[in-house]
Amino acid sequence: MGIVVGLLTIGMIAESVAAAPWDNQITPKSGVGLGSYVSISIENAKHYSIMLFPNAPIRVLDVWRVKENTWYIIEVKYYRIPLSGQYQFAVILPESAEVNLKEATDLDGKKILSDEYKKVEYLGPWLGRNSFHFKKEGWLAWKVGVRLPTKFTKRGWTIIGTVGTSMSSFGDSGKLIASFYGIKRLVESLGKKFTLSALKKLALRSNFIGLIVTIIETGLNVDIGFIYVG
């Protein structure tokens, strides 16, 4: 679950996507880009969807309500990625979050830091604290992801995000980071009160949607989850 891009034609671009099997039980609704799909979810957290105007560039915001200092599993999935060649992705969490990387696994339950064969390889920190860089392992893997045990230690609003690409790099990382933290600052300005209407107003009356579109326009697959810690 995450951001639903209004112009779904972005997701129809398939020039970098090889033919892949499709699981009929998977119906991702978020993070559409370059033929692949990405979604973020948080196990055992309360979930809300905020509908924006139908003609807005971003139609739905997904919100997850979690308890302070409680462990959750953040699951990030990438579907219909290129069967051949490389694919890499990064998961970005707020600085106040704690991640137990020793217990983190791929989607098959294999620990990320173990020596056994996994469909993803951990490359280390991406940019800054609590940003984690992964790449796909195996030419025939069309779906990859990670499960990160995480707790949030600071009350109030924040965000989590992921970006993925089949290119050799993420391109303009400076622009990506600036846009992500621009959205984060706007959302955190909502403070410690839980109100979905305030988040919706912020999305429609600030440049926060523009910042999301800036990330999407880089050609990356992207998803952002909006988190309330209380």
Image (cartoon, rainbow, N blue to C red):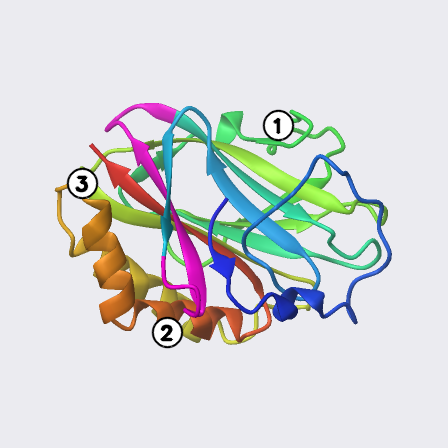
Horizontal side of residue 16 vs 114, given as left or right: right
- Disc 2 target residue: 210
Label 2 amino acid? Gly
Question: At 42% across and 24% down in the image, what residue appears?
Answer: 44
Q: Closer to the N terminus: mark 3 or mark 2?
A: 3
The magenta stretch spans which residues? 52-71
Label 1 amino acid? Lys
* Disc 2 to disc 1, C-alpha distance: 37 Å
Q: Mark 1 Cα within 10 Å, few/some/many (few <14, many 20+)? A: many
Q: What is the secondary structure assignment of the residue under circle 1?
A: loop
Q: How many marks?
A: 3
Percent position (x, y) of residue 83? 83, 53
- Disc 1 target residue: 111
Q: Is residue 62 magenta?
A: yes
Q: Mark 3 Cα within 10 Å, few/some/many (few <14, many 20+)? A: some
Percent position (x, y) of residue 15? 79, 71
- Disc 3 target residue: 194
Give me the disc on residue 73.
none
